[in-house]
Every structure is written in C-alpha cells, then in structure tokens.
C-alpha cells in the first residue's frame, strides 16, 4: 500500500529556514503513485487531490478531511499523468494503455477516450480557453 504525506509549510521566526510538518498520511494505491495533483483554486466548493497510479486508476480525495471521493477506473495499464481543467470540472489522464481519457468530476465517468497512439501516453496538458491574468 502506497502512502501520500501531506505537509504544512511554515517559517520559524525570522529565520530563512523552511520547515515542513506532516498534516496527513493517506493510504492510497496498491501500486506505485505516479502523480499527485491539487485541483485549481477555482473549483469551489471543494478542492481535490488526484493521485494517479500503476494500479490502472486515479483516486480523487477531498482535501477537506482527505476523504476518498471516488476512484476513476477504465485504464488498462499504468496512469502516468493527470491534469484538472481550470474550473476543476474535468480531469484528463494519460496511460500506458495508449489512451488519454477525459473524466467529469461530478460523476467520475470517462466521457471521452482519445486513442490513436502506438505507444504509451505518458503525459497530458490541457488548454481549456482560460486566459491568464496580464502581468
């Protein structure tokens, strides 16, 4: 069983040393954890932690209390990467099974499977039309 340690960062006094204290330790997947990702700040009312694994799944944790919300299943091999949409409504995953999947966070269903690669899909990115703020 793999674990995820969630840390709280704080500065001690006026020193420049940063200390990390563990907040939670999650018992997660039966295989390797390949990616952990926090959802963006815009996905109110909840914030999520996604953990992708060699156990062919992605688990979605509610950061408020670190409860397991759902497990996304459907990939046939390791899930290497995941990325949330800017509003947190969708999650895209990339897998060694040569597919990328688009999941809806409300139900945990894969609403689209992107196929066509001849080898593993090891990473993914999403440009969902959101513009960054001007600097």
Image (spheres, rainbow, N blue to C red):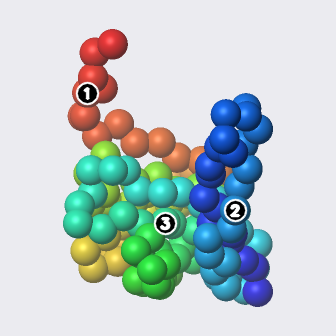
Q: Secondary structure at mark 2?
A: strand
Q: Can you tell which mark lies on residue 87? A: none
In this rendering, does residue 25 appear at all? Answer: yes
What quarter of the picture does the N terminus occupy? bottom right
Of label 2 and label 3, which has the lower sequence position? 2
Q: Is residue 75 visible?
A: no
The residue carrying pointer 3 sits among few (fewer than 14), some (14 to 19) or many (20 or more) residues within 10 Å by Cα, namely some
Q: Position of residue 86 (x, y in %)?
A: 31, 46
Quick check: 62 above or below 94? below
For the point 62% across and 51% down, the residue is: 9
Q: Nearer the viewer, residue 94 or 106?
A: 106
> Dot 1, crowdedness within 10 Å: few (<14), some or many (≥20)?
few
Q: Mark 1 and mark 3: span between their CA atoms? A: 23 Å
Helix, strand or loop for disc 3? strand
In the rendered image of this protein, does residue 105 appear above or below residue 95? below
Residue at image x 25%, y 74%? 106
Q: Secondary structure at mark 1?
A: loop
Q: CA distance from mark 1 to mark 2?
A: 35 Å
> What's the mark number on residue 49?
3
Whether pointer 1 and pointer 3 mark residues with C-beta atoms closer than 8 Å, the reply is no
Q: Position of residue 8 (x, y in %)?
A: 60, 58
Dividing the picture into quadrants, the one containing residue 127 is: top left
Q: Which residue in the protein does label 2 denote?
A: 21
Quarter of the picture containing the C terminus is top left
Q: Report the front residue among 123 and 21.
A: 21
On screen, 72 above or below 5? Answer: below
Residue wearing tag 1 = 131
Task: Report whether 88 appears left or right of 27.
Answer: left
């Amino acid at each position: 069983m793999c674990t995820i340690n969630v840390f709280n960062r704080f500065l001690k006094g006026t020193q420049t040393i940063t200390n990390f204290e563990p907040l939670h330790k999650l018992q997660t997947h039966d295989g390797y954890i390949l990616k952990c990702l926090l959802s963006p700040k815009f996905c109110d009312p909840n914030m999520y932690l996604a953990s992708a694994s060699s156990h062919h799944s992605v688990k979605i944790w509610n950061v408020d209390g670190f409860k397991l919300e759902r497990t996304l299943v459907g990939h046939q091999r390791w899930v290497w990467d995941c990325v949330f949409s800017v509003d947190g409504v969708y999650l895209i995953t990339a897998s060694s099974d040569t597919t990328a999947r688009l999941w809806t966070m409300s139900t945990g269903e894969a609403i689209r499977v992107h196929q066509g690669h001849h080898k593993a899909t090891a990473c993914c990115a999403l440009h969902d039309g959101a513009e960054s703020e001007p600097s």
